[in-house]
Image (cartoon, grey):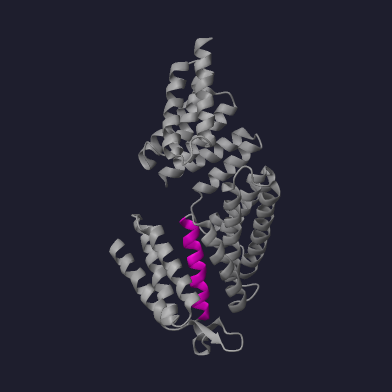
């Protein structure tokens, strides 16, 4: 697979050389872009990610090779302008969809800046090709909204609150517009509508508006029930909202409904972890431990012993053992958390999870000596 990707990048380099002949700026920029992407994926081993890269390369090569997109010299200004051949106009819908797919691939790979550039290009192209109220435009708006939320989540803590609030408002506007278009064009029983409603719910959940989040998750539940889609994640999200609203018994029902399906081990781990948090909040520590242990076992099996999600559950278990005055066990769990967080951190001295774990270790040690 990796050899195929290498050949693909070499083909792109050859095609761009003939396409941009005489345009030094375009030649330099395209060479840099292609080589940057090759270096980004040089050590990639995931089959799914490599397959997506191949699809993206093949579609890009097609656009370049057959002259669908060209840069032509404007003799008046002396500069090159991007033009699309008139005889290739019928291919515009395919080009627009390819641009959207490229944006989605970058987003899945975690390359948020590149994803943002391509989503913006997709937005412009879809408006031109499909119109303001098209399903294609709504898909791009939904993607842009999700990207703004992701950017907000990974932003440095010192980033201005005004910037974060701007990301939040942009995401909300994109989601609301996409939701309206999907509902008008696809009806009220479509998976795309469920996806944007899920994003709206997640956004409200992040802002602490549990009632609004619950409303949107119930809409997701209605749609997915109507189209017989999986409800496991929706049950977990509903339970999370009910937990936030302190409706504990209803939350337990939702988490247990998710566990009854037995569809996805990773989601089972999430449901057990959420139940552990719920029982901890209720003061039922032994029941909480049982749920966390179940989550821990699944996470070790699915993700491996060194994954940060494993450490997240171990942190909760360490805290419970501390509350039960079982300090030796508590310390052992926190030490394991430190090992995992530290090995996964790029900057341990600033990593909030490492810092928090060190604080927990010191508190336990102080308790043991007092």
Say whether residue 98 is visible.
Answer: yes
* Residue 96 among magenta residues: yes
Residue 294 occupies quadrant: top left
Asked whether, in this view, residue 174 is left or right of residue 22, the answer is right
> On the rendered image, what quadrant is the C terminus found in?
top right
Q: Residue at x 45, y 21 (%)?
A: 331
Q: Residue at x 49, y 82 (%)?
A: 70
Magenta stretch? Answer: 92-109
Asked whether, in this view, residue 149 is left or right of residue 316, the answer is right
Q: In the image shown, does 289 or 25 lie closer to the viewer?
A: 25
Q: Magenta-highlighted stretch: main secondary structure?
A: helix
Residue 83 occupies quadrant: bottom right
Q: In the image shown, does 88 or 242 lie closer to the viewer?
A: 88
Q: In the image shown, does 192 or 68 lie closer to the viewer?
A: 68
Seen in the picture, residue 370 relative to 121 is either above or below; the reply is above
Please state the horizontal and vertical placement of residue 122, each as a whole percent of the image: 56, 70
Seen in the picture, residue 272 relative to 138 is either above or below; the reply is above
Asked whether, in this view, residue 353 is left or right of residue 250, the answer is left
Q: For the image shown, how many numbered marks are present on the structure?
A: 0
Seen in the picture, residue 60 relative to 321 is either above or below; the reply is below
Residue 120 occupies quadrant: bottom right
Please state the horizontal and vertical placement of residue 297, each as a whole percent of the image: 39, 34
* Residue 75 among magenta residues: no
Residue at the limit of the structure toward the right, as seen here: 162
Say whether residue 190 is visible.
Answer: no
Please state the horizontal and vertical placement of residue 124, each as a whole percent of the image: 61, 72
Seen in the picture, residue 12 relative to 85 is either above or below; the reply is above
> On the rendered image, what quadrant is the N terminus found in?
bottom left
Please state the horizontal and vertical placement of residue 58, each as a whole percent of the image: 39, 72
Q: Residue at x 64, y 35 (%)?
A: 247
């Amino acid at each position: 697979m990796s050899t195929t990707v290498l050949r693909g990048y070499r083909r792109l380099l050859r095609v761009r050389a003939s396409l941009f002949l005489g345009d030094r700026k375009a030649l330099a920029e395209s060479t840099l872009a292609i080589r940057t992407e090759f270096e980004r994926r040089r050590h990639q081993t995931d089959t799914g990610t490599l397959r997506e890269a191949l699809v993206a390369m093949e579609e890009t090569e097609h656009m370049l090779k057959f002259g669908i997109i060209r840069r032509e010299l404007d003799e008046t200004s002396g500069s090159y302008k991007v033009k699309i051949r008139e005889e290739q106009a019928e291919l515009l819908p395919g080009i627009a969809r390819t641009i959207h797919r490229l944006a989605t691939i970058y987003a899945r790979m975690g390359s948020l800046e590149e994803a943002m550039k391509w989503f913006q290009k997709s937005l412009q192209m879809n408006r031109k090709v499909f119109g303001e109220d098209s399903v294609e435009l709504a898909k791009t708006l939904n993607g842009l909204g999700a990207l703004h939320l992701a950017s907000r989540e990974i932003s440095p803590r010192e980033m201005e609150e005004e910037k974060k609030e701007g990301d939040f408002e942009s995401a909300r506007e994109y989601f609301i517009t996409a939701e309206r278009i999907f509902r008008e064009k696809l009806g009220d029983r479509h998976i795309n509508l469920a996806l944007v409603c899920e994003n709206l719910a997640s956004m409200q959940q992040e802002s602490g508006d549990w009632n609004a989040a619950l409303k949107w998750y119930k809409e997701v539940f209605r749609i997915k029930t109507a189209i017989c889609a999986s409800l496991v994640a929706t049950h977990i999200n509903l339970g999370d909202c009910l937990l936030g609203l302190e409706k504990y018994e209803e939350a337990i029902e939702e988490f247990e409904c998710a566990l009854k399906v037995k569809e996805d081990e990773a989601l089972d781990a999430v449901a057990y972890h959420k139940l552990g948090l719920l029982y901890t909040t209720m003061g039922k520590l032994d029941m909480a431990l049982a749920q966390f242990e179940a989550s821990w076992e699944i996470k070790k099996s699915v993700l491996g012993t060194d994954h940060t999600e494993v450490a997240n559950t171990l942190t909760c278990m360490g805290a419970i053992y501390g509350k039960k005055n079982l300090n030796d066990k508590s310390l052992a769990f926190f030490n394991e958390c430190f090992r995992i967080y530290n090995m996964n951190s790029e900057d341990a001295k600033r990593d909030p999870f490492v810092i928090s774990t060190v604080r927990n270790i010191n508190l336990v040690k102080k308790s043991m000596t007092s």
